[in-house]
Image (cartoon, rainbow, N blue to C red):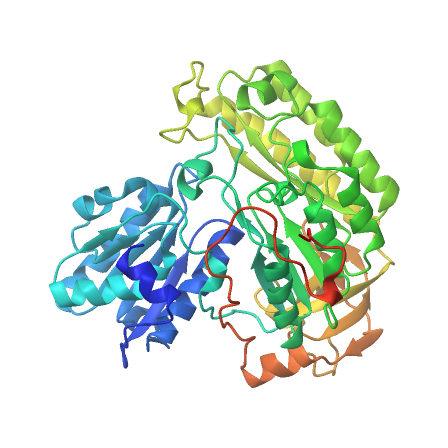
Amino acid sequence: MVAGQAAVVEGVYPRTVGRSYTLRTYGCQMNVHDSERMAGLLEAAGYARADDPATADVVVFNTCAVRENADNKLYGNLGHLRPRKIADPGMQIAVGGCLAQKDRETIVRRAPWVDVVFGTHNVGALPVLLERARHNAAAQVEIIESLEAFPSTLPARRESAYAGWVSISVGCNNTCTFCIVPSLRGTERDRRPGDVLAEVQALAADGVLEVTLLGQNVNSYGVEFGDRGAFAKLLRACGEVDGLERVRFTSPHPRDFTSDVIAAMAQTPNVCPQLHMPLQSGSDRVLKAMRRSYRSARFLAILDEVRASIPDAAISTDIIVGFPGETDDDFAATLDVVEKARFASAFTFQYSPRPGTPAAALPDQLPKAVVQERYERLVALQEQISWEQNRALQGRTVEVLVATGEGRKDAETRRLSGRARDGRLVHFSPGERAVRPGDVVTVGVTYGAPHHLVADGPLLDHRRTRAGDAHEAGTRPGGAPTGLGLPGFGTPAPLPAAAAGCGSTR
């Protein structure tokens, strides 16, 4: 075990009192949650979050490597910090996350004013590396190749009083030709069900109303300890957690999506009627080239089964346009599947080659103009479908968990925002009520826009919650480690009695 990891696992942190930090996060929900862990580590080491990010003593970049412009974005931001670093050599810059795992020493070569580079497998080393860089007056680059301590053993500074991320696995066993994630996050490692549930229970005990279970492929959860039904059991166990009102998860893979998961979703009241399942392409030929181990008919059959059990489910997806060799007929097949699927929303991407992935070396890379034209057609189609679905909800009553920073809205309307149980964004008028983030309101939808719902009538109900109290007081759920130790192999330990049915017993 490297020195930084050892210090974290043993609970020994270098004390750095009086210095401030700021975090800049790019990429997926996993990165957002990793940043909560980084913040928790820094605060455990005596750092304080900077009131003004522009004056922070330590700037940490948690990077993403999925998009083509990730490198340019990082080096542009590092360039902007160079004058400040020259003027104040005592300030420090750290770069972590997927791009750091990929580029390693390249970062320090291109931006020699960076103090620390760390990867996806040694988040816990951050405070030690910062201290070492200060002591040695030299950049510290530490990248390890495999996970040694599960990130959820680390402290966390939770961003929300009402919603929390919970990792159930890290890494991925798939070999999609366009994706660089497996080489940066490693093969799948599963947390023990009892440990996952203990963290969920701790969050709920602190007043958190909503939990999102995170993994690169959540429905392959359990493969490491030999229980193919572990994810469905985990969903059902979350249904037994006192005070937990909403459970979401992201993201499943169509290959591993099974009927027991659909049944668990339908039969567990606090599992939200929402599903995000990446399609990537509607062309079977392109899916094969992507090494996606399903075809369009199978994908649509899963959606039919979900809607048969959960009629009001809002289903979203990811789609890549312009994969190498994609023909007009291939793209037409994607439009056809989108028409049939009736997604509530879609995250659409123009294919960008990532060095080190098989797809980057494929022939027939498409011209930018072709990809852009197809992308615009796809976006237009999905916008039309989303708008039709949201207009159909006008007059419906929805329950909204009030949130902060959700979407853009006209300040003059004095609307607040939150998410309905199906994940749709709702802007509503609180009237004269003192509604707080973390509270729950019931509203009537007056207008459906392509990307959100509007509820400008009077509140039908307003429930003040412990989460709202915590938000108002400025407190956050405890981020103490959950005692996981190192991830292990084999049959997991038995769950507590309250969690019966989730996971295996010896």
Closer-to-camera residue (436/150): 150
Closer-to-camera residue (489/365): 489
Give the residue drawn at x 81%, y 67%: 443
Q: Is residue 183 above or below residue 25?
A: above
Give the residue drawn at x 75%, y 37%: 258
Return the x and y of residue 161 as percentages of the image width and height. Answer: 59, 74
Return the x and y of residue 274 as percentages of the image width and height. Answer: 73, 50
Residue 141 lies left or right of residue 235; in this view the side is: left
Give the residue drawn at x 58%, y 37%: 348
Q: Is residue 23 visible?
A: yes
Return the x and y of residue 273 as percentages of the image width and height. Answer: 78, 52
Q: Is residue 496 above or below residue 449?
A: below
Q: Is residue 407 visible?
A: no
Q: Is residue 256 above or below residue 410?
A: above
Residue 399 lies left or right of residue 90; in this view the side is: right
Disc tally is 0
Give the residue drawn at x 34%, y 56%: 61
Name, please, the residue furthest toward the bottom: 473
Residue 89 lies left or right of residue 412; in this view the side is: left
- Tell me which corner region of the image, top left, top right, bottom left or bottom right, holds residue 367: top left
Residue 348 lies left or right of residue 398; in this view the side is: left
Return the x and y of residue 19 as percentages of the image width and height. Answer: 27, 77
* Quarter of the picture holding the N terminus: bottom left
Closer-to-camera residue (348/118): 118
Name, please, the residue furthest toward the front: 506
